[in-house]
């Protein structure tokens, strides 16, 4: 090691390389002995003295500084310092171990030498600071003198003369920079640079500089000035300033040489310039042409003609930039000179390009033709003028026959623009002909972009009052467009109708087919709501499909609602309510849409209508025939039993489960169900009317007048009577916009607290999420609930995490037991203040259980047998309460994390608990997967076959801590949600949390799941489930019910953990936090299917096992579709097919045929190398008979799906 260092010291390059490898150098120092180190320092000292000897240094008298003559000597000194600093770091490490520092004498000598150089450098810096202060004082004095001179100036003329004189006197002298050195720049360039950097407004004074430039002569002064002027075109602050534009246009018009120099830069910048800045360039070229002398006009016109060529021949997006550049000439074509210029430049080009075989050139020419129409010589006689006009009209008609959709769109825009701008000039015959082309040809074509462009053109034409009468005759010919399949066409057409209504005071809405419009609006309203509910990952690249823009749907629904309500608001309040109820009876979804999206109703008018509708709803619901809608749940059950005795218990339970999921009742009586929909929709409409649409309305809602109106017309007893009834969710929807008095507030608060504390029943999630939680958020009470549930979640995760150590030590404890009761800190409703009374409804037994648990061991032994039994029962009951609290906390926090506006409560208030939960649950999952993968997963053989020995029936299983599927779902949902949202939150707020280790846990967990090995794997795969069912019926598996239940629960929990873990994998991959290069997803998928197969073998309930299998199959299919869409697999077709093959092998005959076909279509779109895919499918189709364990139905289903794909391939070839 010592010899290597000694060799490296002699050469600068090797020494630099050695210092860069800092870790290796520290290891070298650690391995060297003291004698070796002394030899190194002695050698380095000698070499350093050679590099810093006086002969190799220069003394700068002006700055009193020593400077190296050669750069290598200076670099060697710096590298030597780096080398010594690394050794000092080594000494610091040794000092921590030995508690003292020992430095070799030779190293001390070298160190002192370097320290001396450092002191010289410090003194040099001090001298430099002193010099800088002196220079600053001198500059300050110079500024003061300049100010004095400025005060002495008498007039602007005198100052200009002085500046000109100074400029001429400096012409022959070189200019000096800040360091006093000569810059050798010509005076015009020097002054121009100052102006570019400082004050552009002085440019007018310096136009005289141009007379000193020798135009067209290549010399230093001229070339520098040219470059500087072209550089000014890059500076927005220069060409955006009017003085800057005037100076550029003046310079441009001085000579052909500078004109072409600027023109080349001008064209180049136009292509890359921000689009908004093109207008400034346009003003420069226009000003140059307008003010240029006669001898330069031909040059300028030739350059403008070049720009026209670019606008015609360039690609569409680039051509649009040049059109924008020339637009200033088009908009000022009323000027005679500009008309002559347009005719002179465009006439030789435009007609030929309008008939070009290239559709892009035709498109560009049509866009220009729109603004320069009709391209007629202003000096032509009247007879020839009519002929030229006829030529222009013929061009319009020919463009309307074009076969390209983009050119047709440009032609439609052109015709509408010409009609709108030249309506009074065009004769009647041509007007009718052009309108017929627009209405009968362009609007009835198959291209949506053309129809949309025509409607936009008609919208502009509707602003012309002289054309309004023609719309009375045209409307019947275009009204069918309101039901067009294209969303943009419908949206713009509704906008056109609203504008016509406003301008002409005629209700065009009455001329529209109302039923078709209602169907279209209702369909779009449902599409809008579905799109709002669908969560899509931006990285998904599934099969090509039409992307639905929800913002455009929203705009269409707003305008359509305003169109419908236009006829409602012209009536009095009673008539308005009558029309709304009639509309709701026929089309409830449409009325909800109207109340939600309409924007042409004032807030006070909406509130008046809402109060009337609320009063009508309350009156109708209290009629005898509708009284069941306001019955409490217990009364409703009794009423159902009395009126419908034929409802079985199973049907009632199924109905209750459905009610809890979808959030509303399904009535058996169709008439009653219809009334339920009617009045619930009416209350939703009232809530939409009360909701403020913008910030102004929000401020108005807080006024005293509005609040008094709400208290008067929205009586609170209606809301109290609706509690625990079918109409309660809809009444509670109104409470977000109302304020209650104190007594009624307490009643609803108590009810809401009870509902939030009973989420574990899984019956009121919809009510809590949509109504109670927003209500508590408005009242400011939600934070207390979040705090208590977060504390209990922290206790729960600590208990789960502690089981890892318990299991690792082999402690014989009840692993599946719930976490201990933590007393007041874990109460869900609050211990004091807000929500303190909430736990009295549901946790009283928990307090007693807690007290009993504090009983000491001697006291337990002293109680009699009966007391012992009672104590065990209370403990079991208390554990059950804790399970309910745990599940309640998981569900409540899952609801909170769904809405972004609640995140700050958790993430700002409890960041440590959120990260602690995410961190520890990540390690818990890693621990579980590691335990499963350590050994082969052994399914008791007697489950596979009854012929295995009895002694193999007793086998140990891995304790998983979590077995309840509801808890697994809750924990996994919170784990993934916290990981996703809190990671983003901590990154934005720069919170110091470590995330890399959690990402590594995900990657390791994927590998662990992929590495699981199954004993008797082939027997598990090939086991015939029908034979197992037959043996089970014959009683061959008697005496194993307890074992079956135990293994069913165990495998079901593993399967649940892995399938929910797929969500975490998708998130990590989608956010590019995890690479999939090393992941073996073929084995990963195979092992999930094997666990599913094991569950089918062990589970006694055949129907339940089939449900689990189908659910797992669908989840894996979506997971694979997601994973295989990534670029990593784009060129790995064989890997894709291998995974697809595994997926086919585990696709049983119970999977419906339509699901297999759907998956096959998606996979076909994912795999780009089609021929390899089709060859694989053909081979699988032919050779799958050899796979003897595949069922006949399974083979037939896959064959049918493959046949469909291959048939589509053959059709595509034809």
Image: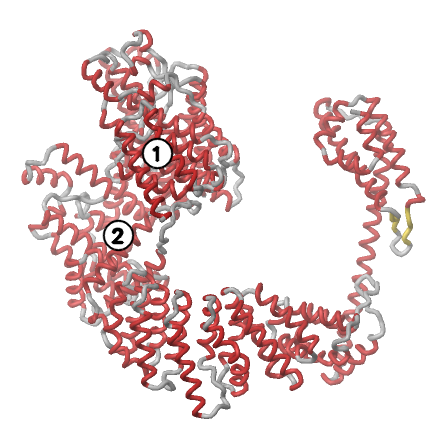
| Vertical arrangement, residue 699 with respect to residue 921, above or below | below
Res. 970 mark: 1
Q: Is residue 584 left or right of residue 936?
A: left
| Vertical arrangement, residue 1008 with respect to residue 724, above or below | above
The quarter holding residue 454 reads bottom left
Between the residue at mark 2 and the residue at mark 1, the CA separation in whole angstroms equals: 29 Å
Q: Secondary structure at mark 1?
A: helix
Q: Residues within 10 Å of mark 1 (few under 14, many from 20)?
A: many
The quarter holding residue 404 reads bottom left
Find residue 477 and report its horizontal and vertical position in percent: 25, 72
Find residue 45 and report its horizontal and vertical position in percent: 87, 33
Q: Is residue 981 visible?
A: no
Q: Residues within 10 Å of mark 2 (few under 14, many from 20)?
A: some
| Vertical arrangement, residue 382 with respect to residue 367, above or below | below
Res. 735 mark: 2
Q: Secondary structure at mark 2?
A: helix
Q: Nearer the viewer, residue 1006 or 505?
A: 1006
Work out which quarter of the rendered image holds the N terminus and state it: top right
The quarter holding residue 959 reads top left
Res. 628 mark: none
């Amino acid at each position: 090691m010592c010899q290597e260092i000694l060799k490296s010291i002699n050469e600068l390059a090797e020494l630099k390389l050695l210092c860069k490898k800092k870790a290796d150098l520290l290891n070298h120092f650690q391995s060297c002995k003291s004698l070796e180190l002394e030899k190194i320092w002695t050698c380095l000292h000698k070499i350093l003295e050679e590099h810093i000897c006086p002969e190799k240094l220069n003394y700068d008298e002006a700055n009193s500084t020593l400077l190296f003559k050669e750069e290598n000597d200076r670099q060697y000194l710096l590298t030597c310092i780096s080398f010594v600093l690394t050794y000092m770091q080594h000494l610091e490490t040794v000092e921590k171990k030995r508690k003292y520092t020992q430095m070799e004498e030779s190293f001390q000598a070298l160190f002192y030498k370097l320290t001396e150089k450092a002191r010289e450098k410090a003194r040099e810096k001090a001298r430099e600071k002193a010099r800088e202060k002196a220079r600053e004082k001198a500059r300050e004095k110079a500024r003061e003198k300049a100010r004095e001179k400025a005060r002495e100036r008498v007039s602007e003329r005198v100052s200009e003369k002085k500046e000109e004189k100074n400029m001429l006197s400096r012409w022959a002298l070189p200019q000096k920079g800040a360091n006093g050195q000569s810059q050798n720049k010509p005076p015009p360039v020097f002054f121009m640079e100052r102006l570019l950097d400082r004050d552009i407004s002085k440019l007018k004074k310096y136009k005289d500089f141009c007379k000193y430039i020798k135009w067209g002569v290549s010399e230093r002064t001229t070339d520098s000035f040219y470059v500087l002027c072209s550089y000014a075109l890059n500076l927005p602050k220069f060409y955006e300033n009017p003085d800057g534009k005037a100076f550029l246009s003046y310079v441009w018009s001085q000579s052909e040489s500078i004109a072409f120099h600027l023109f080349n830069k001008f064209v180049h910048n136009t292509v890359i310039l921000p689009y908004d800045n093109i207008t400034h360039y346009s003003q420069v070229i226009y000003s140059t042409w307008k003010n240029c002398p006669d001898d330069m006009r031909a040059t300028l016109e030739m350059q403008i003609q070049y720009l026209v060529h670019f606008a015609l021949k360039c690609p569409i997006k680039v051509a649009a930039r040049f059109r924008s550049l020339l637009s200033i000439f088009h908009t000022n074509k009323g000027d005679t000179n500009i008309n002559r210029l347009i005719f002179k430049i465009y006439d030789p080009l435009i007609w030929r390009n309008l008939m070009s075989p290239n559709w892009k050139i035709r498109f560009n020419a049509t866009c220009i033709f729109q603004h320069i129409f009709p391209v007629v010589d202003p000096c032509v006689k009247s007879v020839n003028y009519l002929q030229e006009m006829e030529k222009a009209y013929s061009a319009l008609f020919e463009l309307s026959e074009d076969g390209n959709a983009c050119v047709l769109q440009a032609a439609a825009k052109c015709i509408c623009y010409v009609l709108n701008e030249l309506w009074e000039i065009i004769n009647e015959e041509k007007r009718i002909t052009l309108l017929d082309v627009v209405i009968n040809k362009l609007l009835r074509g198959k291209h949506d972009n053309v129809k949309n462009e025509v409607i936009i053109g008609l919208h502009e034409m509707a602003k012309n009052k002289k054309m309004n009468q023609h719309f009375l005759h045209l409307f019947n010919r275009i009204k069918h467009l309101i039901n067009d399949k294209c969303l943009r066409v419908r949206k713009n057409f509704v906008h056109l109708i609203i504008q016509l209504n406003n301008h002409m005071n005629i209700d065009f809405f009455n001329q529209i087919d109302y039923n078709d419009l209602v169907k279209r609006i209702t369909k779009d309203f449902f599409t809008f709501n579905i799109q709002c509910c669908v969560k899509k990952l931006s990285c998904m690249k599934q099969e090509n499909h039409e992307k639905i823009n929800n913002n455009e749907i929203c705009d269409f629904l707003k305008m359509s609602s305003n169109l419908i309500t236009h006829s409602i608001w012209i009536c009095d309040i009673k008539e308005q309510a009558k029309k709304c109820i009639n509309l709701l009876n026929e089309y409830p979804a449409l009325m909800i849409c109207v109340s939600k999206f309409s924007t042409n109703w004032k807030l006070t008018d909406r509130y008046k209508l809402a109060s009337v509708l609320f009063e009508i709803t309350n009156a109708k619901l209290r009629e005898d025939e509708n009284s069941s809608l306001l019955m409490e749940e217990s009364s409703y059950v009794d009423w159902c039993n009395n009126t419908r005795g034929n409802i079985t218990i199973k049907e009632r339970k199924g109905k209750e489960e459905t009610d809890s999921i979808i959030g509303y009742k399904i009535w058996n009586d169709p008439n009653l169900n219809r009334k339920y929909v009617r009045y619930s929709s009416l209350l939703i409409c009232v809530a939409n009317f009360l909701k403020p649409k913008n910030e102004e309305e929000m401020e108005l809602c807080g006024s005293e007048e509005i609040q008094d109106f709400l208290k008067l017309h929205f009586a609170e007893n209606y809301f109290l009577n609706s509690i625990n009834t079918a109409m309660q969710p809809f009444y509670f929807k109104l409470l977000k916009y109302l304020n209650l008095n104190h007594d009624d507030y307490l009643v609803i608060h108590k009810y809401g607290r009870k509902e939030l504390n009973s989420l574990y029943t899984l019956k009121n999630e919809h009510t809590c999420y949509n109504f109670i939680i927003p209500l508590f958020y408005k009242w400011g009470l939600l934070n207390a609930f979040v705090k208590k549930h977060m504390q209990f979640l922290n206790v729960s995760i600590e208990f789960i995490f502690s089981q890892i150590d318990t299991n690792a030590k082999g402690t014989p404890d009840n692993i599946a037991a719930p976490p201990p009761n933590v007393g007041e800190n874990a109460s869900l409703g609050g211990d004091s203040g807000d929500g303190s009374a909430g736990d009295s409804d549901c946790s009283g037994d928990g307090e007693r259980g807690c007290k009993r648990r504090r009983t000491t061991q001697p006291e337990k032994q002293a109680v009699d047998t009966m007391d012992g039994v009672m104590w065990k029962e209370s403990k079991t009951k208390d554990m059950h309460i804790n399970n309910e609290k745990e599940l309640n906390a998981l569900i409540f926090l899952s609801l909170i994390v769904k809405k972004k506006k609640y995140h700050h409560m958790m993430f700002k208030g409890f960041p440590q608990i959120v990260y602690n939960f995410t961190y520890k649950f990540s390690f818990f999952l890693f621990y579980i997967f590691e335990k499963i993968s350590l050994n082969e997963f052994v399914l008791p053989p007697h489950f596979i076959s009854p012929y295995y020995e009895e002694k193999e029936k007793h086998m140990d299983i891995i304790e998983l801590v979590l077995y309840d599927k509801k808890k697994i779902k809750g924990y996994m949902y919170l784990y993934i949600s916290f990981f996703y949202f809190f990671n983003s939150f901590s990154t934005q707020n720069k919170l110091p949390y470590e995330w890399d280790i959690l990402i590594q846990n995900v990657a390791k967990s994927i590998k662990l799941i992929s590495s699981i090995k199954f004993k008797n794997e082939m027997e598990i795969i090939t086991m015939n489930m029908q034979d197992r069912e037959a043996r089970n019926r014959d009683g061959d598996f008697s005496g194993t019910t307890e074992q079956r239940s135990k293994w069913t629960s165990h495998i079901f929990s593993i399967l649940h953990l892995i399938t929910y873990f797929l969500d975490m994998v998708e998130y990590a991959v989608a956010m590019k936090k995890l690479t999939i290069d090393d992941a073996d997803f073929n084995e990963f998928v195979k092992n999930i299917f094997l666990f599913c197969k094991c569950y089918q073998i062990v589970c006694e309930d055949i129907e339940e096992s089939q449900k689990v299998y189908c659910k797992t199959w669908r989840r894996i299919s979506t997971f694979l579709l997601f994973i295989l869409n990534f670029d990593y697999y784009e060129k790995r077709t064989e890997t894709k097919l291998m995974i697809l093959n595994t997926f086919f092998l585990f696709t049983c005959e119970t999977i419906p045929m339509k699901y297999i076909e759907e998956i096959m279509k998606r996979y076909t779109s994912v795999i780009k190398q089609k021929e390899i895919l089709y060859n694989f499918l053909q081979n699988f189709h032919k050779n799958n008979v050899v796979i003897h364990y595949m069922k006949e139905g399974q083979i037939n289903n896959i064959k049918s799906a493959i046949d469909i794909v291959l048939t589509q391939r053959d059709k595509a070839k034809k």
